[in-house]
Amino acid sequence: MELCFRETKKPGLFPRFRDALLFSALWCAALAAARLLDCLPYALTGLVPLLVLSFLPKRARRIAAAALLALSLGFFAIRFASVLNGLKMLANQMFSVSESCQAYKYDYFSVTDSAASLREGLVFVSLLTALAVFLRAGPALTALLWAAQAYFGVTPPGFWLALLLLAAALCFMPGEGLWLHSLLAVSLTALIALGVFFLAPGTNPSLSGAEEVVRDRLAVHSIFYERTPELTETPEPETEQPDVQELQPDRAVDKKEINVLFYALALLTLLLLFVPAVFRDRARKKREKNRAGFADPDCAAAIRAMYLHSRKWLQLRPMETPGDIQDLWLEAAYSDHALTPAQRARMEEYLTRVEQTVWDAAGKRERLRIRYRLCL
C-alpha cells in the first residue's frame, strides 16, 4: 500500500491584499471626483470586514459574507431615514460638481443638511462595496465608476486614476510569478498614464459630439443654452484686459478632452485586461476538463486517461513509445486486473516526460497553440 501526499502552496500575503487595494482605489477616485476626500475615513469602513473575509478559511467565507450582507441591511433598516438622506446628499454633491463642469442642470433631492447622515450613507455604501469586491465584482465597479465619471463630466486627479488602473490590473494577475506580473502591471499603468494624460491628442470633435448626444438622450431634462447678446464696453487704449468670453470656450474644451480620455482609458483597460482574462479562464477550464481523468480513484481508468492524453502530445512531435508503457496501456484497457499505484505513478512519469520534451522542442507560436487552443 502506497500513500501519496500533495502539498498545496498557501497564498502569500500580497494576493490577500489585492481586493483591499482595489477597494481603497475605488473610493479614493470616487471621492476625489466628488470633492469629498475629507470623508474618506468613513468610506473606508468596509476595508476592515473585507480584510477579515480575505484571511478567513474558504469554508467560513460564505457564512461571513452572508453575515456582512445581513449587517448592512440591518444597519439600513435601523437607520433608514438618516442613511437615505445621506445617499441623497451624495447625489446632490455629484450634481453640484457636474454643473460646475458641464452646461447641464439637475433636479436636486430635497434633503436635510446633516453631517451625520452623510457619514452614515457613506458607511452603508462602503459595506456594500466591500461585499461586492469580495464577490469578484471589483472590475464591474471600476467600469461603472468610469462610466459615471464620463457621464457627469467630473474627473479626479490623474494620480487617483492611475492608482485605480493599477489596482484593477493587479486583480487579474495570476498567483504564480506574482512579482513579475506585478512589475508588468506597474509598467503598463505607467505607459497608459503617460500616453493618456501627457501625450494624448487634442479633442476629437466627432467623439465630443457623440458624447453630447448620448447625454441628451439619457438626461431627464435637456436644456438648450443660447448665448444672449451682451453689451460690451470699449476698453481704454492704455489698459488691455483679457476677454472673459474668449477664455470660456478653452475651459469647455479642457473638460471635453478629459471626458474623451476616459473613453480611451476604459477601452485600453478592456483590451489589455478583460479580454486576455476571458481567454485565460477559458483555457484553464478546458485544460482541467482534459485532465479530469487523471485523479480517478481507479488506477486503470487514470492510466487510460494519461496514456490517451500523451497521444495528443505525441501528435505534435512523434516519438517511439516504450514497450513497458505500451504493455501497461494494453493491460489497463483490455484486462480486468487491478492495477497498482506504482503502475499509475509509472504512467504519470511517462506523461510528464513527454510533455516536457514536446514543450522544450516547440517554438513560441506552437507553445501559444498548446496553451490556449489545444489546452493540453
Image: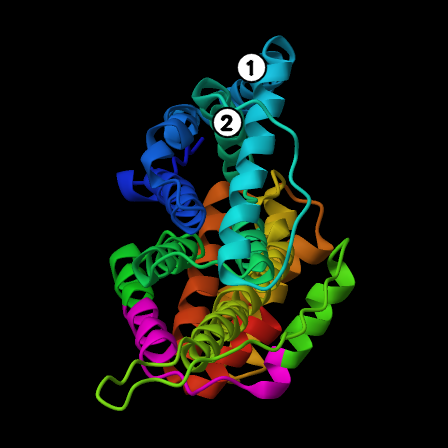
Numbered badge on residue 71: 1
Numbered badge on residue 127: 2
- Residue at the spot 78% in from the left edge and 64% down from the top edge: 217
**The N terminus lies in which quarter of the figure?**
top left
Q: Is residue 328 above or below residue 96?
A: below
- Residue at the spot 63% in from the left edge and 15% down from the top edge: 81
Magenta span has 99?
no
Give the Cα distance between marks 1 and 2: 9 Å
Give residue 262's position: percent from left, percent from top. Answer: 50, 68
- Quarter where residue 206 is shown: bottom right
- Please name whichever residue, 183 or 297, is drawn nearer the observer in this view of the structure: 183
Q: Main secondary structure of the magenta part?
A: helix
At label 2, counting other C-alpha atoms closer than 10 Å, the crowd grade (few under 14, some 14-19, many 20 or more) is many
Q: Which residues are magenta?
A: 187-208
Mark before the other along the chain sequence, 1 or 2: 1
Contact between labelled residues 2 and 1, with CB atoms less than 8 Å apart: yes
Q: Is residue 289 above or below residue 113?
A: below
Snapshot colouring? rainbow
Q: Which type of secondary structure does the marked residue at label 2 adopt?
A: helix
- Please name whichever residue, 281 or 224, is drawn nearer the observer in this view of the structure: 224
Q: Is residue 319 left or right of residue 211?
A: left
Numbered badge on residue 196: none
Residue farthest to the bottom? 237
Give residue 72's position: percent from left, percent from top. Answer: 57, 19
Q: Which type of secondary structure does the marked residue at label 1 adopt?
A: helix
- Please name whichever residue, 153 or 272, is drawn nearer the observer in this view of the structure: 153
Residue farthest to the left? 238
Give residue 89's position: percent from left, percent from top. Answer: 55, 32
- Identify which amino acid the numbered label 1 is placed on: Leu
- Identify which amino acid the numbered label 2 is placed on: Leu
Magenta span has 206?
yes
